[in-house]
Amino acid sequence: MSSAKSPSTSPSIQICRIMRPDDANIVGNVHGGTILKMIEEAGCIIGTRHCNTQSGDRCVAALARVERTDFLHPMFIGEVAHVSAEISYTSKHSVEVQVNVLSENILTGAKKVTNKAALWYVPFSIKNMDKIIDVPPIEYSSPEVEEEGKKRYESQKMERFETKERNGELINPVSIPEPYTVGFSQSSLIHLVGPSDCTLLGFVHGGVTMKLMDEVAGIVAVRHCKTNIVTASVDAINFHRKIMKGCVITVSGRMTFTSNKSMEIEVFVDADPLVEAEQGKFRAVTAFFTYISLDKENRPLPVPTLKLEGEDEQKRFEEGKVRYLQNKAKRLAEKERQQ
Amino acid sequence: MSSAKSPSTSPSIQICRIMRPDDANIVGNVHGGTILKMIEEAGCIIGTRHCNTQSGDRCVAALARVERTDFLHPMFIGEVAHVSAEISYTSKHSVEVQVNVLSENILTGAKKVTNKAALWYVPFSIKNMDKIIDVPPIEYSSPEVEEEGKKRYESQKMERFETKERNGELINPVSIPEPYTVGFSQSSLIHLVGPSDCTLLGFVHGGVTMKLMDEVAGIVAVRHCKTNIVTASVDAINFHRKIMKGCVITVSGRMTFTSNKSMEIEVFVDADPLVEAEQGKFRAVTAFFTYISLDKENRPLPVPTLKLEGEDEQKRFEEGKVRYLQNKAKRLAEKERQQ
Amino acid sequence: MSSAKSPSTSPSIQICRIMRPDDANIVGNVHGGTILKMIEEAGCIIGTRHCNTQSGDRCVAALARVERTDFLHPMFIGEVAHVSAEISYTSKHSVEVQVNVLSENILTGAKKVTNKAALWYVPFSIKNMDKIIDVPPIEYSSPEVEEEGKKRYESQKMERFETKERNGELINPVSIPEPYTVGFSQSSLIHLVGPSDCTLLGFVHGGVTMKLMDEVAGIVAVRHCKTNIVTASVDAINFHRKIMKGCVITVSGRMTFTSNKSMEIEVFVDADPLVEAEQGKFRAVTAFFTYISLDKENRPLPVPTLKLEGEDEQKRFEEGKVRYLQNKAKRLAEKERQQ
């Protein structure tokens, strides 16, 4: 983590909370979605705080993107989740926030790093929700730190641009669901956006959306393998359009790929403004979630192979395989670098 | 279920959600109320969506009636509830929605129909909440289907009319307490202790109890002075006995004292273990909350004097006055010490 | 605040959270209860953590006492509440935690101290919930600091002892209703309508009302038969008037009829607009809920017969019987038609 310091305000924050039964599945594993929601709350607070450390329009930070996130260890009911966030890079219109999550067993004192995440925020004016505000720059501990941040900024900008194109297609459910097929496990839920899901400006907190995405993906995973499952990682997620209060959001998930020990699930979030019909439905977010299956001692179990039907499913499986191999290679490279 | 088709939009919707510990009682049976709430959410979404598929005023569908509903099978924690809703009839000003609820055990794949429900909605304009909007008609698969819908419409209209008389009645308790008396503002609530209210050892977090106490005391205060009120202080609270999961707690509040600018409310928490009857009810906590009344600029407002009836109320008022004067003296002493 | 240091672990913790609409009243003032709950969560975490920094039994800290707490400034929706807690004194069996609450307006950067609180915790063994664990001592910055802590400890011990007598009393209402009578099981709750209970137009979702009705009816049913109960059916419910945001609703239930295997409970919902006093209270909804009692294998159990007192109860019982027989006949007719 960088030691970046903002000139005008402390750029770090600490959130912590006891994990309760409703944060977890029946076996006691805390849902990945609960953790993603806490991560985003910390990011939103620090991003909004930083962008208001200057004169001019007051603003609220909207989540624009979450980088790929790994869940390194499962967390359990009764443990305390510690989320610490700090600003690591600023461009003219965006803020990068680095977040670390630690689980603490307050009975044994044991602590584990469970997640590291990087989020990008864009500040919108309170007076005019379509106006983006200039971000006050932070100070970097060294020119190298700034240079690395700039690289991360350029690379996410590129990726955001690419996914913006793709975010349009609709899902076509297949009719007869045989076990282990894509159709068998695919699932969707709808949620009416309420006031407590929203920021001061009336749009949905990114963390609320991610929690719902994890819920659907988790159901898809259980349907496929009928065992206890936990979130292993989430690929980068881009938030292109804000979802406003009063919308109905439909979150759907389908399995795209299975390896021996993991399942990849693609999740779509579609927003329907209901009342403001002229605006029309739109695809707000898509992402890939990876799950693993665990036995009672929390050891990984083999995952049944996905049965593919048709060329589309075959193609998505191949694409999933590429992502799987890339991530595997990346993890290995990181491990080697750390040794 | 009918095959009714709306000309302009898909008239059906699917909601699904995993049942959580807080949705159920301690044995794991999902509360009927949880299911009723999901049913109504589906109805509200599809009703509102349908009534906005036309030009003119935007509107929100308000629930007017639910037909008799049977709960055919119990549902359990960890199961997924599937709620599907479709519009089955429309009159000029109302929409009938048919809802089916299915429970799915995602581990075994077993599915059961748990509920069928029929709801009637009336759309109200967003611009003028007293104005009812015309409902766009749906298409029926056959004249018989429409005819049956019409019969259901007429019969519910009749019943609604009959109950309106009975229901419109004002609440006439045997003796109506006079405004500003203790009896007028006193209030109580019951709360079934759920898993998320509890620690790992299964007893209620003190903070959960205090939140409920503040809720009741706040309602007593608003009932007394009919203005915006805020908590000013809480006297020392002692927790002598643990309240266990599955208990019903009764929280009751009564006003004991008023000064020019403040109200003191005594709050009692009684715990009832319900099933373990041998243990018996006990008084778990008592405390005094002090509230002040604020105007729109958050400045203190005068508080109406409490009207006392009987010796007990007089005695409690005097005791409250002593606490008030003691606390005032203490605050003054502290202020002087700090200067 | 003392600078007490524990020899084995950091004795301080920071919690923060954005205040949401559901944390506040309609004017935007955060409920005192929301703050008290956060304060206690911080206290519970730090207390439990400290008492587990030694070998021996694992334990959970239970709240024993909260000292008098003042709310120095109102807090508002959108502000961030910062709760910091630290251990300031330990006796053999108890831990004193000092908590400070700060509100931060992340738009303007303004910060205010809103609360200072002192809480006392007692650690209970996880293996044996009645056993109190020894508390590991902390180190004090000076003998004076320790001496002051000891004084606070002695004075709260005295007060606790005094209130124990008063509080230990069993609840003795003027007339104790006899088991199985209507009066014995009847129950009611009040609920302050919050933003998340409401539609975009600011009136309560019908589903929210029905959930509360089921909650009260379920408690009436358990109080009557002291077993696991589930909702079997709900009679038609008519919603004649909208209940608006900011109302207090009173939901009350009383048993009207019992058959061999079922109980019928009548539920009333009364709405009180509180501030808009001219409108006055009104009865918003009434309904009949039917419950059955289940054993551990989910098989129906016999229900104790309702003991009737007075003509009114007799009359309502007869009316309930008519509804019961009608519904039974209807179900039989449907079954035959389906065969």
Image (tube, coloured by chain):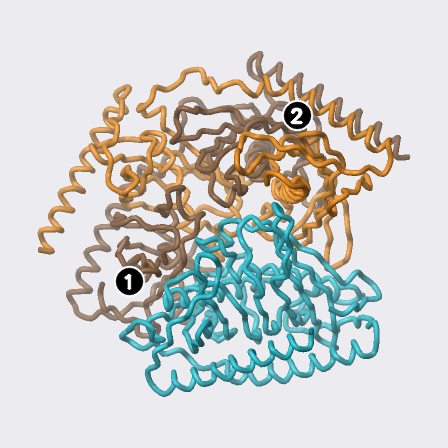
Chain colours: A cyan, B brown, C orange
Chain of the residue on which disc 2 is drawn: B
SS category of the residue bearing label 1: strand
For this orientation, the residue located farthest to the right is B339
Chain of the residue on which disc 1 is drawn: B
What residue is disc 1 on? Answer: B90
Q: Nearer the viewer, residue A257 or C191?
A: A257
Q: Amino acid at mark 1?
A: Thr
Could you confirm whether marks 2 and 1 are on the same chain? Answer: yes
Answer whether labels 2 and 1 touch (C-beta < 8 Å).
no
Of labels 2 and 1, earlier in sequence is 1
Question: The N terminus of chain B is located in which quarter?
Answer: bottom left
Q: Amino acid at mark 2?
A: Thr
Q: Position of residue B244 (x, y in %)?
A: 49, 34
What is the number of the mark on residue B258?
A: 2
Q: Position of residue B127 (x, y in %)?
A: 49, 60
Locate residue A133 relative to residue C30 in the image: left or right. Answer: right
Answer with the quarter of the image where residue B257 lies.
top right
Q: Position of residue A333 (x, y in %)?
A: 63, 79
How far separated are the C-alphas under marks 2 and 1? 55 Å
Q: Position of residue C19 (x, y in %)?
A: 63, 52
Locate residue C291 relative to residue C144 in the image: left or right. Answer: left
Which circle, 2 or 1, is nearer the viewer?
A: 2
- The relative height of residue B261 versus residue B202 in the rendered view (above or below) is above
Locate residue B29 relative to residue C95 in the image: left or right. Answer: left
- The relative height of residue B23 versus residue B131 in the rendered view (above or below) is above
Badge 1 crowding class, 10 Å Cα cut-off, few under 14, some 14 to 19, many 20 or more, is: many
Residue B219 seen: no
Residue drawn at the location 71% of the way across and 48% of the way down: C13
Badge 2 crowding class, 10 Å Cα cut-off, few under 14, some 14 to 19, many 20 or more, is: many
- The relative height of residue B320 versus residue A49 in the rendered view (above or below) is above
